[in-house]
C-alpha cells in the first residue's frame, strides 16, 4: 500500500467520524468547509510535498477531495452535478495546487538556511542535475 493510499484512508476515516457534522442542518456551509479544511484536508497532503507524486496519485487525491465536497454538500453522484459547479459552491482550491503551495513554502525555508547546512549543497546538486 502506498503512502497516498494510507493518507486517503486516514482522511476517509476522519470524514466518517464527522458524518454527523456533515449532515447537521444548523451548521453553515462555511463552517463545514472550515472543519473540512482544518481536520481532513490538513491530514491528506501531510508529508506529500516532499515526494514525487505520480499523475495517478494526484488524480486519486483530487478525486477524494471532490468526493468529500460532494459529501459535505450532500449531493449524490447520480444528481449529475459537475465538479466545476461544486468548486463554485465551495470555493476550495484543488488539492494538487495545495500540495504545490506546500512545496514552494518548503523551498523557501531551504533557501533561507545557512550555507553550511547539508541541505543547501544537496539542493543545488539537484537543481543542476540534467538528464542526457
Image (cartoon, rainbow, N blue to C red):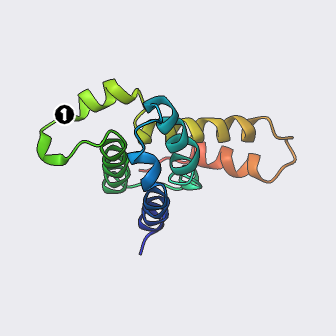
Q: Position of residue 20 (x, y in %)?
A: 44, 53
- Is 44 situated left or right of 56 in this image? right
User: Which residue is at 41% across, 46% downward?
Assistant: 22
Q: Position of residue 21 (x, y in %)?
A: 47, 48
- Is 104 situated left or right of 76 in this image? right
Q: Observer-nearest residue: 112 or 49? A: 49
User: Which residue is at 17% across, 47% downward?
Assistant: 77
**Residue 47 versus residue 92 in the image, above or below:** below
Q: Position of residue 84 (x, y in %)?
A: 25, 29
**Residue 27 versus residue 50 in the image, above or below:** above
- Is 21 situated left or right of 109 in this image? left
Q: Residue furthest bottom?
A: 1
Q: Observer-nearest residue: 80 or 128? A: 80
Assign a secondary structure to mark 1: loop
User: Which residue is at 24% across, 27% downward?
Assistant: 85
Q: Observer-nearest residue: 58 or 122? A: 58
Task: Place residue 107 in its image quadrant.
Answer: top right
Quadrant position of the N terminus in the picture: bottom left
Q: Residues within 10 Å of mark 1 (few under 14, many from 20)?
A: few
- Is 82 situated left or right of 131 in this image? left
Circle 1 is placed at which residue position?
82
Q: Position of residue 3 (x, y in %)?
A: 48, 66
Q: How many marks?
A: 1
Amino acid at each position: 500500500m502506498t503512502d497516498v493510499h494510507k493518507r486517503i484512508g486516514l482522511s476517509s476515516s476522519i470524514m466518517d467520524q464527522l458524518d454527523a457534522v456533515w449532515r447537521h442542518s444548523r451548521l453553515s456551509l462555511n463552517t463545514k468547509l472550515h472543519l473540512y479544511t482544518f481536520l481532513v484536508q490538513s491530514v491528506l497532503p501531510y508529508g506529500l510535498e516532499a515526494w514525487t507524486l505520480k499523475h495517478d496519485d494526484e488524480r486519486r487525491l483530487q478525486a477524494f477531495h471532490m468526493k468529500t465536497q460532494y459529501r459535505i454538500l450532500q449531493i449524490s453522484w447520480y444528481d449529475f452535478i459537475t465538479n466545476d459547479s461544486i468548486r463554485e459552491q465551495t470555493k476550495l482550491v484543488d488539492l494538487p495546487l495545495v500540495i504545490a503551495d506546500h512545496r514552494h513554502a518548503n523551498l523557501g525555508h531551504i533557501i533561507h538556511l545557512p550555507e553550511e547546512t547539508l541541505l543547501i549543497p544537496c539542493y543545488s546538486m539537484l537543481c543542476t542535475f540534467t538528464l542526457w
